[in-house]
Amino acid sequence: EVQLVESGGGLVQPGGSLRLSCAASGFTFSSYWMSWVRQAPGKGLEWVANIKQDGSEKFYVDSVKGRFSISRDNARNSVHLQMSTLRAEDTAVYYCARITGWYNNDYWGQGTLVTVSS
Amino acid sequence: NFMLTQPHSVSESPGKTISISCTRSGGSIASNYVQWYQQRPGSSPTTVIHDHNQRPSRVPDRFSGSIDSSSNSASLTISGLKTEDEADYYCQSYDSSNYVVFGGGTKLTVL
C-alpha cells in the first residue's frame, strides 16, 4: 500500500525557516517524480515544487523561488521542503504527492499545517 | 505562465448530470494533459480523471473528462449524481517549462 506521511509543520514567525519531510513507503520511491502542493485555509490547491527521480531537476512556483528548496533522499525514501524567509501568505496545509505519467498526482499524504504568524 | 479558470460553484439534484469547465488562458488545452481531482471536506485530494479523459480503476464510470480545442477548455462530467459526489473539484495542467497550475476549484453541491 502506497503511503506518504508528512511531518515538520508548525508555528513559525515571519522571516523564519522550517523544513518539511515526507516519508514514502509501499512503492519504489526512486522511480517517481515527487511534488509538494499547498492549500491555504479555506482556499484552493497551489502547486509548490516538483523534483525528478534522481533530484537532478527541480521546478518551483514563482512565489517561492529563491525561498524554498525541494530535495530528496532515495536511500531513506523521503522528500523534503526547506522553507525560508517565510511570509504570512505561506500559511497552508502542505501536501506531499507522488507524480505518475504526465503530472498526475496519484497519491497524496494527509498534509502538515504550517502557520506563519507573530 | 498560464491560468486555469473554473466556475466557483455548481449545484444539481441527485440523479442529474453536471459538467464543470476549466478554461486555459495561455497555451493550448490540447498540448498538455489535464487532470481532475476531487477533494471532500477534511480529506486529501484524489484523482478522478487524468490525461484528459482517463479514469482510474477505482473511479466509477459516471465520471468522464473531455477537452474542447475551440473553447480551449476541459470539462469534467458527472452523471447520475449522488450525494457522495458533493466535494470540491480541481483541474490541473502544466506547460513545456514544467510549470504546474491548478484551477481555482469548483464546489459541487448535490441538493
Image (spheres, coloured by chain):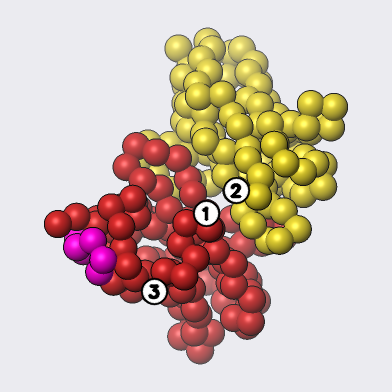
Chain colours: A red, B yellow
Hey, what amino acid is under mark 3? Answer: Gln
- Give above or below for B84 relative to A37: above
Q: Residue B41 appears at what percent x and percent y?
A: 37, 36
Quadrant of residue A86 in the image? bottom left
Please check whether the numbered discs 3 and 2 fall on a single chain.
no
Q: Secondary structure beneath disc 3? A: strand
Find the distance from the CA under tag 1 to the CA under tag 3.
15 Å
Hey, what amino acid is under mark 2? Answer: Val
- Residue tagged 2: B101
Outermost residue, right side? B70
Find the distance from the CA under tag 2 to the CA under tag 1.
6 Å
Marked residue nearer the N-terminal end (1 or 3): 1
Outermost residue, left side? A118
Side (left or right) of B73 relative to A39: right
Specify start and end residues of the magenta stretch as a single range: A11-16
- Give above or below for B68 relative to B80: below
Q: Main secondary structure of the magenta part?
A: loop
Q: Residue at x 52, y 28 (%)?
A: B106
Please check whether the numbered discs 1 and 3 fall on a single chain.
yes
* In magenta stretch: residue A36: no
Q: Evaluate if marks 2 and 1 touch, with contact meaning CB atoms under 8 Å apart.
A: yes
Q: Residue A15 appears at what percent x and percent y?
A: 26, 66
- Residue tagged 3: A82
- Residue tagged 1: A47
Outermost residue, bottom side? A75
Asked whether residue A50 appears in the rendered view, the answer is yes
Side (left or right) of B73 relative to A48: right
